[in-house]
Amino acid sequence: MAGYINWNYFFHAWGFPARFAAIAQVHGCDSCRAQWLASFPEADRTRAAEAMQLHKEALRMLTFLDQQGCRVHFRFGLFDCNSDGEDIVIGRYDDFTNSRIHGFADSRIHGFTDSRRDDAQCTLSFLRQQTPPFLCLADFIRPVNSAGEPDRIGIFCAAADEAIEHSYEGEDDYRHLLCQTLADRLAEAATERAHQAVRKHYWGYAATEELTIPELHAERFQGIRPAVGYPSLPDQSLVFDLDRLIDFSSIGIHLTEHGAMQPHASTCGLMMAHPQARYFDVGRIGEDQLRDYARRKGRDPEELRPFLTKNLS
């Protein structure tokens, strides 16, 4: 999965401006690295040299972790569905090979897994913007209609082995932090790689897609992949609903009572294929919307309030 890492976010975690992340695109020979370093004004070269060294050590650590048998796991399900107002009604699911992505020193795919759950039918509820253009994620799913035509939605989770983020803990603070930041990037890289395969092969709605890694990172593909916690999907309690559908524990993810995912280097969310689907910020909501949202989820408004503190006026 290393080839799918978005190094911009890695360097951002270490406090480097985005321009220094370009070292990840430079050929590894001494000549190319020297030319890259010389391209910076003299005042920035010390910082650029630090970025170059950090990248070199990160690559070495990736090789070491792979040799230690550390893995990144991805699980997904594709479900028939329809929208009903601000809700998405989940129905039939597809079955895929019961295997996993593993290995991140390269970009090979070793398989995916889908959940087989008899109780998969459920309703996922979402929030709508209270200011123009009044978007809701459910808008990008075909509504319930008399013809009974279903749409599709993907649900996913990904995690790096917990051992990665605990490597060197209490022994070497620098290497420990390096492993933690790499674990986060590996989970996201696995998601990027797997979403590409879902679009091209498993779901197949973009079978002819041919995008470079930078184009993938720029999200030039059709559809969106909002993760729980995104501005368009702010309610962290949604992780419990997604867990019931695809069983996060099958790849080692466990949820706290507050919806935090463990290991820390984990992510989950939705895959939507609508050509006009886009990200947005739900923004502020009122007490009336909180009550309506809680009613649709079958929850007490006070149970959901802690998950939506940033959105409540």
Image (tube, grey):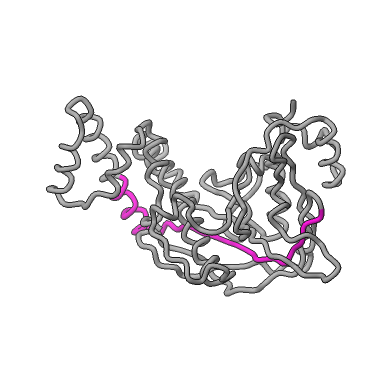
Rendered view: 234 above or below 215 = above
Whether residue 66 is in magenta: the answer is yes
Q: Is residue 46 visible?
A: yes
| Residue under the point 57% across and 49% down | 267
Q: Where, quadrant-wise, is the C terminus in this rendering?
A: top right
User: Where are the magenta residues, as a range?
Assistant: 58-84
Q: Residue furthest left?
A: 31
Q: Can residue 256 be seen in this view?
A: no
| Left or right of residue 3, residue 233 in this image | right
| Residue under the point 79% across and 64% down | 119
| Left or right of residue 6, residue 131 in this image | right
| Residue under the point 44% across and 51% down | 217
The spot of residue 285 in percent (x, y) is 75, 32
Nearest to the observer: residue 12 or residue 258: 12
Count of labels in the image: 0
Nearest to the observer: residue 62 or residue 84: 84
Nearest to the observer: residue 205 or residue 24: 205
| Left or right of residue 50, residue 266 in this image | right
Rendered view: 299 above or below 204 = above
| Residue under the point 74% across and 63% down | 81
